[in-house]
Image: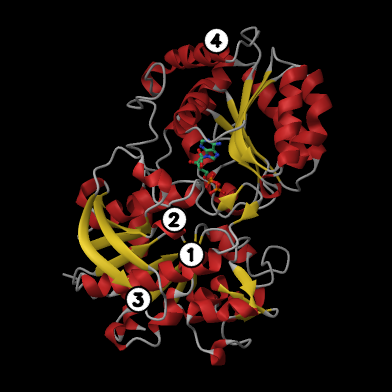
Amino acid sequence: MRRKLKILFVSAEVHPFAKTGGLADVSGALPPALKLLGHDIRVVTPKYFSTSKVGKKMRSIRMALTVPGSKQKGTLFQSELLDNVPIYLIKQDQYYNRKHIYGEPGADYPDNVERFSFFCRAVLETAKKLDFRPDIIHCNDWHAGLIPVYLKFDSWFAKTKTVFSIHNLGYQGNFPYSSLKVTGLDEHLFHTEGIEFYGQLSFLKGGLMFADTLTTVSPAYSQEIQTPKLGFGMEGILQKRSDDLHGILNGVDYTVWNPKIDSLISVNYGPESLSKKTQCRQDLIKMFCLQLDIKTPILCMITRLSEQKGIDLIMQAKETLNAWKVSLLILGTGETKYESFFKNWSQECPDRIAATLNFDEPLGHRILAGSDMLIMPSRYEPCGLTQMYALKYGTVPIVHEIGGLKNSIQEFNIYTGKGTGFKFKTPTKNNFLKSLQKALSCFNQAKIWKNLMLNGMSKDYSWESSAKRYSSLYYKTLRS
Ligand code: ADP
């Protein structure tokens, strides 16, 4: 039998403690799945203002954290994820007790370099204080990118290896050279083979250069980021490290995302009681005061409103969508131009269009359950979770064939009856509309549509198989 591993899992967002997107969902669900494989896994994250409002019990473990060279001190809190996975929350109110996690919408906090370099160093101090000498530190996204760098200069971790996971290469944590001193890192690291990236200090590059193993969240995205089109300038490094780079599709936490047991939706349903989904649809019609006849499909988007998510395509398609008289529900926050667009549209067509421009998790569940289709025209999509959730709720995804969307959705074939959704290759308005048209024509044929919904609902994207892949990768990393 293989030796069970000691793993420290580091993330800036962990559901249900703090969430802005998919990173939180992964960080809340993958560690319990690894625990079920027998590993001793512990999670570390900052303790934010929002964290304190979560119903989970947290207790202070009266440990002060001092970080070499920093005047700030932290303290440690402890709570639990599912399956008794310990989670340690680093409290440092000056840095983390703020309204938002990364900054106001559209404007990152100016001291993020301080906030997250402190976090990286405090994580290592946490391990020492707990006398938990990990085999693996699994670092997620740029916020944890400097951990593999600090580790190289800390003999306490001489036997520890690092895995760095890229959840979105578009967010890099790049800061002016002048902020190097805040990190406490030595000047000699500031060069092209180190943490310098076009004259700036890059947390992400730190992770990419210094971690022993790299992963990203879908096989397709692991290829795409090695090209200039989607490599955000990091493609050269990723090509060089391609042997160490692995694409593992994210999973779904079906204890949270499952219409059979979801307590946030108006009626529970499953493949054997699919007709009850209609009541969830009615719930939305009532809530948003829509005037729809039974044949009008409800489309939805639950998303950050950023350029990445392909909102421009929807803007271009507005006239046609109006002419086709589809209903569209948006739940999202983000760039003002997109928020204004949806707000105006919903005011123009209140019978069919509704925009909720805030972050509302329970509403996300209700919308997913009551809608007929989910649209995700993302320009790029590292994995995307919402389309996999939609499948379970019998809500048919229409997606751009890219990244994780490519790996998780199979094109529906009306003749064979196989497939789970609709995909378009090049993201143009016409291609999107062609896919939508195919979907609408199937929607009008009840038997075909039911078959399509059931195909999606029977898909199993649970974390178990992905967790096994991470586990194998940890052993491989330790052998390297
Ligand atoms: P990303 O990580 O790029 O934001 P994903 O599809 O991987 O995209 O994950 C997004 C997660 O955030 C999903 O759980 C989705 O339901 C949720 N989400 C996004 N925007 C909102 C919102 N405004 N309200 C509630 N949940 C949201």
Label 2 Cα crowd, 10 Å radius (few <14 / some 14-19 / many 20+): many
For disc 3, the neighbor class at 10 Å (few under 14, some 14 to 19, many from 20) is: few
Mark with earlier residue (2, 3): 2
81 relative to 240, above or below: above
Contact (Cβ within 8 Å) of mark 2 with mark 1: yes
SS label for mark 2 = helix
- Viewer-side label of 4, 2: 2
Q: Mark 4 points at which residue?
A: 286
- Decide which of tag 4 and tag 1 comes sooner along the chain: 1
SS at badge 4 = helix
Number of the label disc, if any, that sits on residue 96: 2
**Local SS, label 1:** helix
Q: Report if the CB atoms under discs 4 and 2 are less than 8 Å apart.
A: no
- Judged left or right of residue 351, residue 91 is left
Distance from Cα at disc 2 to Cα at disc 1:
8 Å
Residue 85: % across, % down: 24, 53
Q: Which residue, given by chain and number where applicable, does mark 1 sit on?
A: 115
- Report which quarter residue 108 is drawn in: bottom right
Q: Is mark 3 within 8 Å of ligand 1?
A: no
Real-space CA distance between mark 1 and mark 3, rounded to the nearest whole angstrom: 32 Å
**Amino acid beneath label 3:** Lys
Q: From the image, tell me which residue sits under label 3.
A: 476
